[in-house]
Image: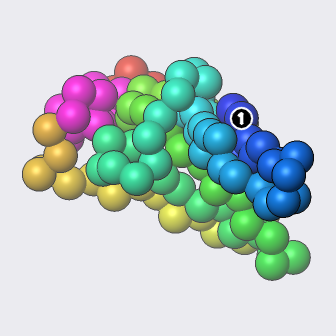
């Protein structure tokens, strides 16, 4: 989810715009700020029959599984990658199994 849009400042002299701060993204589950340009987030897309797509970002498998029941699926959805190489807390394979078992 987008927490804050890009912020631009317009020069009063020449009229050009300068980027002051970039867009800030957050976890769709808990809302904490996350950095999308790293492998420290989970990403999934919900594809709708009408061609629209919803993109979701999560900070942990727990947030993903907590948020999953709220998603309306009418076509198909891809799930975040599960990788043994990921060592970030909340995103490991052990975290995946722990979060999944917590949903039983």
The answer to which quarter of the image holds residue 53 is bottom right
Q: Which residues are magenta?
A: 88-100
Q: Quadrant of the N terminus?
A: top right
Residue at point 44% right, 41% down?
Answer: 35
Residue at point 53% right, 56% down?
Answer: 44
Camera-side residue: 20 or 100? 20
Residue 12 visible within the image: yes
Residue 27 horizontal/vertical position (percent): 55, 33
Q: Which residue is mark 1?
A: 4
Residue 88 horizontal/vertical position (percent): 21, 34
For label 1, the SS is: strand
Q: Is residue 40 part of the magenta span, yes or no?
A: no
Residue at point 39% right, 32% down?
Answer: 60
Whether residue 36 sits left or right of residue 26 in the image: it is: left
* Count of marks placed on residues: 1
Residue at point 14% right, 38% down?
Answer: 87
Residue 31 horizontal/vertical position (percent): 61, 24
Whether residue 35 sits left or right of residue 97 in the image: it is: right
Camera-side residue: 87 or 21? 21
Magenta: main secondary structure equals helix
Camera-side residue: 41 or 101? 41
Question: 10 Å neighbourhood of mark 1: few (<14), some, or many (≥20)?
Answer: few
Whether residue 39 sits left or right of residue 22 in the image: it is: left
Residue 72 visible within the image: no
């Amino acid at each position: 989810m987008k927490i804050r849009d890009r912020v631009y400042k317009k020069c009063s002299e020449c009229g050009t715009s300068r980027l002051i701060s970039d867009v800030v993204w957050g976890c769709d589950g808990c809302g904490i700020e996350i950095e999308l340009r790293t492998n420290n987030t989970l990403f999934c897309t919900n594809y709708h029959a009408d061609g629209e797509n919803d993109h979701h970002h999560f900070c942990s498998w727990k947030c993903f599984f907590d948020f999953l029941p709220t998603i309306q699926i009418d076509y198909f959805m891809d799930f975040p990658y599960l990788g043994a190489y990921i060592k970030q807390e909340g995103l490991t394979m052990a975290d995946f199994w722990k979060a999944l078992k917590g949903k039983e």
